[in-house]
Structures are given as C-alpha cells and as structure tokens.
Amino acid sequence: METTMDCCESRASSLTRRSLLFGGASFAAWAYLPKFARAAEGRDPRLIVVILRGALDGLATVAPIGDPDYAALHGSIALTSSGAKGATMLDNFFGLHPAMPEFSRMYREKRAAVVHAVATSYRERSHFDGQDVLESGFAGPGRVQSGWLNRALESLPRGERVTSGLAVGPTTPLILRGAAPTVAWAPVALPQAAEDTAMRLMDLYSQRDPALAKALAAGLQLDKVAKGDDMKPKPGINGAAAMRLVARGAAKLMAADDGPRIAALAFDGWDTHANEGGATGRLAQLLGGLDGALAEFESGLAARWRDTVVVVATEFGRTARINGTEGTDHGTGTVALLVGGAVKGGRIISDWPGLKPANLYQGRDLAPTTDLRAVFKGVLHDHLGIGESALAQTVFPDSASAKPMKGLLA
Amino acid sequence: MARDSQAALVALNRFGFGARGGASGDFINAASDPRGFVKAELNRTNGALLELPGLASTPALAKAVFDYQFEIQQARNAAAKPGNRGAATEAPQSSEAAPKQTRNLSLNRIAMEMAPKEPSMQQGEAGSAAAPPAEPMPPGAKAPPPQPPNVIQKTFRAEALARIQRATMADCGIVERLVAFWSNHFCISASKGGLARMWAGSFEREAIRPHVFGRFTDMLKAVEQHPAMLFFLDNQQSLGPDSRAGIFRNRGLNENLAREIMELHTLGVDGGYTQEDVTSLARVITGWTYAGRLGQLGTPGTFVFNANAHQPGAHRVLGKTYEAGGVAQGEAVLADLARHPSTAKFVAAKFVRHFVADDPPPALVARLQDVFTRTDGDLRAMTLALIDADEAWKAPLTKIRSPYEFMIATGRVLARIPGDPGRYLGGLNTLGQPLWSPAGPNGFPDTNAAWAAPEGMKLRLDIAAQVASRIADSVDPRDLLEVVAANAASPETRRTVERAETRQQALALLLMSPEFQRR
C-alpha cells in the first residue's frame, strides 16, 4: 500500500483540477441505525456507495485484454498483460489496472467482484444528467430532489439515532438527498457557533422560515466534530490522498457501535478527455487513490468488514476508441466494482458484448449489457433486506425490467 | 416609512447585493423608487467594466506565467543536470497548438504548489479561521507565510480582491450580480491548472463584463475565443484529424469544448442537438487556440486561429452546412447557436431561475425568451424586461443567497471594504463555492437544494458567528437591522436581535435572519 501511495504522490501534479478544499471528496450517511442493526442474529450490515463523478473509463480499469479489438481501440493507453507495469490478469480475459493492488488482493481473497459492460438507463452523454440518473434512481434525467439510497432508507425500519462524532461538510450528494435525515462529514475543522446562538436562530426560523428551520435543525444534529488530527486536511493534499483521507474518516465513523451504517461518498475528477495515461498517468493516480480508499475501508472497519458491501459506480463510461488527445470522450458501458467481506467475490460478472465495430454502442462505446440498477437492487435486496416491490416502485421507479441481480453476496 | 418596504427588499436583495451600512441610505432610496434604484446602475456607460492599474490583460498574464514556468524549468534543469538542455528546449516548443504532457505537468505543478495555500488561508495559521469580510489586517498582525506567493497566486488574489471590492462598493449591485450570473453561466474553473487560475479574473473582465449589456452572441464569441476557455475545455489540444498538424502528430479531436458550447452555453441539454452535431462542431472549431510562449502563432496568450490544426472542408451542424472558411466557419456556427430558439429558452429560464425562483414562473420565462428572440439576444433588453416584470416584484423572496452573495452582502452591511481577499476566499471554500472554481463546466448550482442544505446552513452560522465575534464590538446590530430591512423586518427577527445576549450574538443572528438570507 505504502509504495502505491508514494508513487502516486510523486506524480500528484495532474490532479489539481478537482483538488478543492476537500480534494473533491465528500461523505454523507443516514442519520439512523437500521432497526435490525443489533438484531439477535448478530448480523449488522454496512453499505457504502462510492460515486465516481466524471465517468470512469471502465475499459482502462478492468481491461478486456483478451478481446482482439481492445488494443487497437485503446491505442497508446491500452494496458497489456506483460511488463513491469502490466495489468493483473483477473482471469484469462480481463486485466486489472496495475494501480489497484489492493483490489487485486481482495479479488484473490474472493472479497471483490467486477460487473462489466454495465450502465444506468441513461443513454445520452451529459455528465450532469448522467449523474442525476445514477444518483436519483429515476429512469431519466430531470430536476429531482431525492436520491435512490435515501428512498431506500425510508423503507428500512428506523432504529436509534447515529450519535458518533459527526461533523458537517458543505454538500450532500444527490444519491443521499431526500426525506430520510442524513449526516455528513468532511475533514475540516471550523470553530463553531455557540449552541445558544444556534438555538435562538432555530427559534426564529421555526417562527418565520420553516424551510430554513428544517435545514438548520438537521445541520445542528451533526454538531460534534470528528476528533483526531489525522482528519484535518494537510497542506499539499492531492485528489488521491483526499480520497484516502475521506475514506479513513468514514470508516472510523462507521466502525463505531453507534456510528452510521449506510453511507455514500463521491469522488470527483474522472473525466479523462486528454492525456488519460495508461499504466501510469492521470487515471492511474485516481485509481490508486480509489484503491487506497478501498483499503482504508477494509482496515478501518476491521471486524465490521465481514458484514460490509462497498459499491463503486460512475455515471457512464467513455469511448472505446481513444480520441485525438490520448484521452477518451463520453461513452456508455463501463464497470461497477463490489468490495467487502460480504461480497461473493473473485468474479467478473459480465455478458461481454465484444468490441467489434458492429458491437459497439452507436459505433463508439462499450455496449451496456447489464443494467446498473439491477446491481444496486441486488445489493439492497440481499444485504439490507429491502423488498422487490419497494425497489421497483419507490427506490428505482420504472425499473421493473431490471430485476435485482442475484447471488452478489456471499 | 410610508414607502414600499417590501419592494425595497426586492430591489436590494433580489436584484442587488443587499443594503450597505454606514450612511448609504440604501433602504430609503430603494423604498422610494424601487425600480429606479435598480435601473440607475444600468445607465452608466461601461459600468460593468473593471479596469484597474494592477489588473493586466490576458496576454500580459500569459507572459508572466510562461516566464515563471520557464524560470522554474531552467532552475530544475540546472539543478538536475547542468549539461542537459533537452527538456528545456522541448517544453517551450510544445507549448504551441498541441502542448505535450511535459508542459501540462509543469503548469499543474505550479498550481499544485499553491493549491493548498487557499485552504490554509482558510484554516488560518494564526488561528483566524475561515470567515468572511473584515477590515484589512494590520500588516504586522499575521505571521509571514513560509514562502512568498508566486505570480499565479498573487494574480488570482488581486483579481479576486478587485471583484470583491467592486461588489462591496456598488450602489445596488445589480451589475455585479449580472457579471456573477454570466460568469457562472460561461464558467471556467481555476482548479484546472496554473493558466486557468492566472486567467480566471481576466477572462471575466475581457469576455463577460464588456457584454453584460450587449448582445449574447458577442459574449458567446468572446467567451469561446478566450484563451482561458480554450484551455479550460482542452480545445488547444484538439486537432483536425485531417489537418496538417493532426496528420503530422497523429492526434485528433477533443469534443470537450464543442459539447459544452451546446449543452451548457447555448442550446441546453435538451436543446435538440445530437452527438453528430457535437462532433461536427468540434471539427469546426479545431484550430481555435491561443499562442504559446514562443509566439510562433502570434502574441503569446492571444486567441489565434491555427489553420494547420483546422479540420478542412465544409461541416454540417444542426442540419446546416458551413462551408470552409477558417475561423469564420466557427463564428458562423456560434452566431446561429446564439440565435437558436433553444438558446433563448434555455437562457431565459436560467436567468429567471437565478433572480426570481427555483421554479421560474413560465409566463415570465416566456416573456424574456420572447424579448431575447426579438432583440437578437440584447441582454440589456432582457435585463430591463425582468426588472419591469410584475412577477419579479411580487414573487416571494424564497431563494437563499449563494455563499458568494451572502459574503458580499455581509461586507456591505458592515461597511467593510476588504484590503485582502483571504477571508472571503476561505469562507467561499468552506461554504462550497470556491471563487471561480466550480467542480465542473456547468458552474455552481443555483437552487435552494444546493445552498440551503443542512450542512451549508450550519457552516453559514459558524461563519456568521466568527464574523460577529470580530466585528460586533464596533457596530450596533439594532442599527444594522434598520439598514437591512427597516420596517420590513419581522417582529420575530426584531425581537431575536434585540434580545440577544451579546452584540456578537445579535449580529450573528441578524446575518442569519430570513431578511438577510432570503432574496
């Protein structure tokens, strides 16, 4: 791990586009424990959804090296199975990006799986609409105010309130916005307003401005700053380090007995239009950051890892053929990753469409053969026990055709 | 006051940046003639321009950053290997039409060196945490930073300061609100890299401000031909596959700019274009680039049309064929996009959503769309139509101020003209709206869902409390309530401010009151 991160940090320079205060990384969670959290059976599931904003190049993450058309399409950035920086072959067809040794190990340990040639129901190429569809769970884009994970929470029995030390971050990702109360955390230390001031303001809002009252009340619930110096942003932090940092903080919070069980993280920066890089380069750094974040979940959740599922998804894929600037433009099919002690791993789940020109979606993208909603629904059904009718009607409206994928969990 | 207090709130807050403290008389003036108060600012010639001695043109800034980058490169080469001049000669050459990765890396490295500075400003080395407006710090009060700011940091901060000062001092603030709106519509992001950070301010001064009361088509052309936008959306790297440079370098198209022109700048995502149109526009604007350090194509940092990179031939966009014609080919497409019915609809809805309501009244949108169409995109006419519309005055003040609007309004009511942008930049980072640095080319969101979120409100309160803890000793919050809302203040807000335990608490509560937060 350390070697990976060292090598990433030495090439941290191209991550600046999204390296804002939080390195383009955010965390938010459900404010309640599910009722079954302490059920007699001893099962206490954790679910983490990681959204990669910007559209991940699935063909560069888990490369179909055995596909005869892959090398020519991905050209100068294509991965190969040989050499010092070769892809790690997951089977005799797919190779994993070399920047992901932790995922590779988890895959060998059968705690990580890949779903390939996957896409949401969105078929256009706008990031913002694509992210809306991915996170809202609706079949098409539109201005919506709630996300599928939030609506999934509404069908869970609500137990005690999360009381672990949670602070506030400036944003909640759409996937977790909605009626179910959420908490958020960001690695920032900010002196807080006195509680008395906050209470007086609450009083004023409740008389004059119910909407602001509701928002502030939710914000104030999260009043306790996560302690520990390791959670403050350090000078010189880059995107990859920020991913790790946020994941470490999230895992620490979620490992606690009274910590959140269901959370979403969003990592920005995957829009690799130019100089995407192959085994090394811009995407490699990001994947290294993601790999580090997955390792942080594993080590931070410790004994809870056994009951954890992490789903990594992105709004759409990228063009199969590289563009004129050694990058890839907006595409369709891509990968989703499943990691965690509860995952039935060591598998690549794919109805591979092939990369022959005639098989590409609109002649340019990896054709999607698996509906991403089926993956989400399978996890929500098997991991959290959410019923099929709720999944098909409220969590993912108009998704009856995308049946929950079976057997994703061990 | 026998005047229209509610209309004064609309004039000051919906259309402007809020009432100024001190002896401005803003509220009384706005109450006596609300529309006139807003329109007065529109009648000043060149009122949107921002020209100050310290603010340089894009080419001048380019020269500074190229020189700085070159110096670093030289120093690095000298340190690494005294005899090896290979890297030094390669990098500058590649800074023409299709820069190689080496150049990007070194520019990004420059940005990287400074990237942590803004957050650490906000963290406040001397314990002064993220917080907005304030009087300039006494020069000796702060521990000196470990390293002097580089030219990019200095430029960014100077540009930020100029913008913040202008907004803080403006009478109503409608002009600066319009600048912020259009700048966000046509946003670039300083976090793209050193050049983008260097040019963030000059982009706004050169491409946005001159056209805020001009024609949309002129703003569109100025934006898409500005080096900052070409850099932000990678167009300087896009080569016509059949152009001389494309064949020679075996590189080709990058659709980034072409897509965002259609999706975000003109037609809107549902505006009726196809993937083919995007690709075709990408071909049309190949060769739109800026001259690099060596100036082989022109004065460094100026827009140039590089015929060697341009995809030759006629191209078809939205069903119309544009004959080969160099830069004029792309300009013709832009002109047609500016005039497209989808653009009128998209722009009018966004404009009304910004100023009036998250769900813009359809009749008002339709009227502005009509004005936009009839006047061939006259932005002054569209702005006046909004100010003249009854809906804009009758609609309740339901929108929450964005973090930028909140911080500017705070500086105005406290009558503090900042001498240093640090607290503003830090506060904007904390509240999720880092200046000129949206996460993507769609700019910052413009709805309550984004800015009235639980986390954001809590952080806003923390920032209000911090401002109050620094400032409140020198002001009377009860007086400030008169400045902000006079007799439009609710009894509850008045009571809350008056009954606060301390001046500090009263000021924090005033800054967080619905009268101050809603617009």
Image (cartoon, coloured by chain):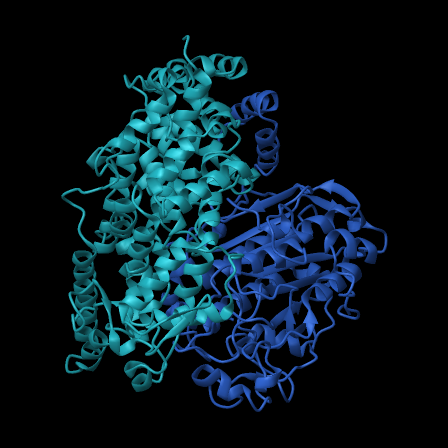
Chain colours: A blue, B cyan
Question: Which is more toward the observer, B65 or B203?
Answer: B203
Q: Compare residues B8 and B372 and report the one nearer the observer.
A: B372
Quadrant of the image occupied by residue B234: bottom left
Q: Position of residue B227 (x, y in %)?
A: 27, 61
- Marks counted in the figure total 0
**Residue B243 located left or right of residue B434:** left
Nearer to the camera, B217 or A377: B217
Q: Is residue B431 visible?
A: no
Does residue B340 appear anywhere in the picture?
A: yes
Give the quarter of the image for residue B29: top left
Which residue is rendered at x = 31% and y = 84% of the image? B249
Figure quadrant of residue B389: top left
Q: Residue B373: x percent and y percent?
A: 41, 47
Q: Residue at x 54, y 88 (%)?
A: A81
The C terminus of chain A is located in which quarter?
bottom right
Residue B470 x %, y %: 35, 27
Q: Residue furthest right?
A: A40
At horizontal 76% and vertical 55% (from top left) the residue drawn is A44
Q: What is the x, y in percent for residue B56? A: 17, 51
Establish if A333 lies above or below A66. Answer: above
Is B354 situated above or below B496? Answer: below
Outermost residue, top side = B2
Horizontal side of residue B71 vs A291, given as left or right:
left
Whether A8 is drawn above or below A181: the answer is: below
Residue furthest to the front = B374
